């Protein structure tokens, strides 16, 4: 265990010479703080990253239906006070259909079921090993305050004591060095300046941008999860209320703030909304891998709340659960996600907006398997598509130091390109970026790289011999024009199941020829198609019928009629032909 106390930290802070900045912005009379620094070696994963489990406490604050749902996919770690209590819970789990193979226990005394507020905060330390950060819980509940350390010791992972008073419900992070809390964190740590608080979260959590915002609900608890939730690194969900609500102005000021604040992707936050006219705790949800568990109230607004999540998080399974919820305390408060310590981590800054590059669009990512297993390189790459076309796959190539890239080919001006990154490793893990993959793929618009291309005109009907004999070679010709003056290639369909290669290139408007021979008797329809140097293909030409061998039927019919009408002349001619050996 790594122990640090406040006195030592204060000495370290005073002696630090590294630059720290604190910027204040005033919006509608409210104060916001943003901290930026650049010497982080620690990463704190976000709630929307891979989770291996969830931490809850008995007696429960959530229903068995919720526990059953969670145990379908992850390990449910239940805090119990004793072995006897563990046996009781195990029996209850079995009677309620909970998958007990996905259940484990932490035997420890507790004071409440709000594991979100006092549970462990997970980090990846400078050695790429999972650790637990233990803070001072902002409630007089000493047993709860010991849970992060007890969990870390149980799992044999390092624990770091962060000298800060706070609660998990007033904290959320994007996994990229940015975190958000309300000004409650300042109020509970008056012994520190704002800059010193920034320094603490930087040193222990790797946070280089700490957004401290006013609480907009006007309630005593002042937790961020009562009105806002990060759904991804660049999307935040904020509650919406009628204009008559007493907190309307404060809530809309927060919306404006985030819409004008730059996310870790270098773009403003996308703000999604969920309507809470009666202070429903819809933002107090739990993201658990590809599922979102939403507290619902059994009223007319529940369906709209589910729809808001579905629109903001396409591809996720959004599930509503009733409970003893109130506006300041719901599902998120009573469950704490446990980060997958062996996750396959993908870090990527998406390509957005208009993109222009004549050589293609370079997609780069850091891909690191915390399992220590090797990447499966043949399955690690970029899936992309143009407009509404099918998905294409490009294997990513190593750039060294766990960085990889793939280049999406240049596209015609105005093309919408969608893409996502997929990676697999030998531990059996497979991950996407964005997390859900294709349903929420990134997209950008190609600008100025390739001009709109027009296919060649339909080639002229082939010209050449229309009858012949099998085995002989015959020459056929055609031509087409390309409106873009591109050179063209031709492919010939000889009507006997054989096709030529793409022949060329030929200049637009110039006659092109090809040869073919047929091996069997019959009548064949030959046709030809053109394509330009950019791959745009014309329609097939009109067919030309070719007969092998020459058609002697008409000649035989003529001589039969001649014999019938002029028998004496016919015999005379036959005698003459025979004398000359014809």
Image: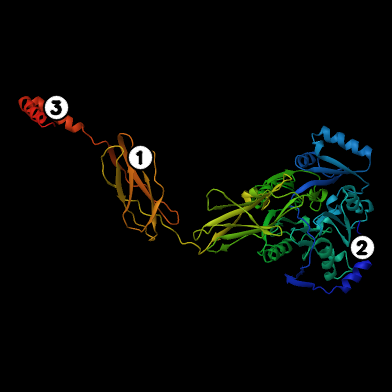
* Residue of label 2: 4
Gap in angstroms between the C-alphas marked 3 and 2: 117 Å
Label located before the other in sequence (2 or 1): 2
Q: Label 3: few (<14), some or many (≥20) within 10 Å? A: few
Name the side, left or right, on which 559 lies relative to 459: left
* Residue of label 3: 560
- Helix, strand or loop status at disc 1: loop
Label located before the other in sequence (3 or 2): 2
Name the side, left or right, on which 130 lies relative to 528: right
> Residue visible at 53% across and 59% down?
410
Q: Residue 32 at x, y = what percent?
A: 76, 68
Gap in angstroms between the C-alphas marked 1 and 3: 34 Å
Task: Please identify the quarter of the rendering in which residue 226 is found.
Answer: bottom right
Residue 495: numbered disc: 1
Gap in angstroms between the C-alphas marked 2 and 1: 84 Å
Q: Residue 189 at x, y = what percent?
A: 88, 65
State which quarter of the image contains the C terminus. top left
Front tag of 3 and 2 = 3
Name the side, left or right, on which 526 lies relative to 276: left
Label located before the other in sequence (1 or 3): 1
Q: How many marks?
A: 3
Q: Is residue 163 above or below residue 390?
A: below
Name the side, left or right, on which 538 lies relative to 38: left
């Amino acid at each position: 265990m790594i122990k640090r106390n406040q006195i030592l930290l204060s000495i370290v802070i005073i002696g630090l010479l590294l630059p720290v900045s604190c910027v204040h912005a005033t919006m509608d009379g409210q104060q916001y703080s943003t901290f930026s620094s650049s010497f982080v070696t620690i990463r704190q994963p976000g709630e929307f990253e891979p989770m291996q489990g969830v931490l809850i406490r008995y007696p429960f604050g959530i229903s068995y239906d919720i526990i059953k749902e969670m145990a379908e996919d992850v390990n449910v770690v239940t805090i119990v006070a004793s072995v006897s209590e563990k046996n009781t819970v195990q029996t209850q789990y079995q009677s309620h259909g909970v998958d007990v193979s996905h259940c484990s226990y932490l035997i420890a005394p507790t004071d409440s079921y709000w594991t979100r507020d006092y549970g462990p905060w997970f980090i990846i330390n400078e050695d790429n090993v999972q650790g637990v950060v233990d803070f001072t819980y902002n409630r007089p509940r000493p047993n709860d305050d010991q849970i992060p350390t007890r969990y870390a010791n149980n799992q044999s992972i390092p624990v770091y004591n962060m000298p800060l008073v706070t609660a998990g419900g007033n904290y959320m992070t994007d996994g990229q060095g940015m975190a958000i809390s309300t000004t409650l964190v300042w109020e509970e740590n008056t012994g520190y300046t704002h800059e010193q608080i920034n320094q603490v979260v930087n040193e222990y959590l790797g946070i280089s941008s700490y957004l401290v915002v006013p609480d907009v609900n006007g309630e005593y608890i002042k937790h961020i999860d009562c009105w806002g939730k990060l759904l991804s690194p660049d999307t935040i969900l904020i509650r919406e209320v009628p204009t008559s609500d007493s907190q309307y102005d404060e809530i809309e000021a927060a919306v404006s703030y985030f819409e004008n604040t730059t996310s870790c992707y270098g773009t403003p936050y996308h703000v999604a909304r969920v309507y809470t006219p009666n202070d429903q705790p819809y933002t107090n949800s739990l993201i658990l891998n590809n599922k979102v568990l939403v507290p619902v109230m059994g009223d007319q607004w529940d369906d709209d709340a589910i729809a808001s999540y579905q629109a903001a998080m396409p591809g996720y399974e959004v599930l509503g659960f009733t409970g003893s919820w109130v506006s300041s305390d719901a599902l998120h408060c009573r469950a704490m996600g446990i980060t997958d310590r062996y996750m396959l981590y993908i870090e990527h800054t998406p390509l957005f907006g208009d993109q222009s590059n004549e050589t293609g669009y370079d997609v780069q990512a850091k891909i690191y398997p915390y399992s220590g297993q090797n990447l499966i390189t043949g399955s690690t790459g970029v899936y992309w598509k143009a407009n509404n076309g099918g998905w294409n796959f490009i294997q990513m190539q190593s750039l060294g130091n766990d960085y990889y890239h793939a280049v999406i080919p240049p596209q015609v001006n105005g093309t919408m390109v969608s893409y996502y990154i997929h990676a697999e490793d030998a531990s059996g893990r497979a991950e996407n970026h964005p997390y859900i993959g294709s349903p929420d793929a990134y997209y950008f618009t190609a600008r100025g790289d390739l001009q709109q291309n027009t296919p060649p005109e339909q080639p002229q009907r082939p010209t050449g011999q229309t009858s012949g004999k099998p085995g002989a070679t015959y020459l056929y010709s055609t031509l087409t024009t390309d409106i873009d003056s591109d050179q063209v290639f031709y492919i010939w369909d000889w009507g006997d199941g054989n096709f030529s290669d793409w022949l060329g290139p030929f200049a637009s408007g110039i006659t092109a020829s090809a040869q073919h021979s047929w091996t069997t008797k019959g009548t064949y329809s030959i046709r030809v198609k053109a394509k330009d140097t950019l791959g745009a293909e014309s329609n097939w030409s009109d067919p030309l019928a070719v007969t092998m061998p020459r058609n002697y039927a008409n000649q035989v019919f003529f001589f039969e009629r001649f014999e019938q009408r002029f028998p004496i002349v016919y015999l005379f001619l036959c005698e003459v032909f025979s004398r000359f050996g014809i």
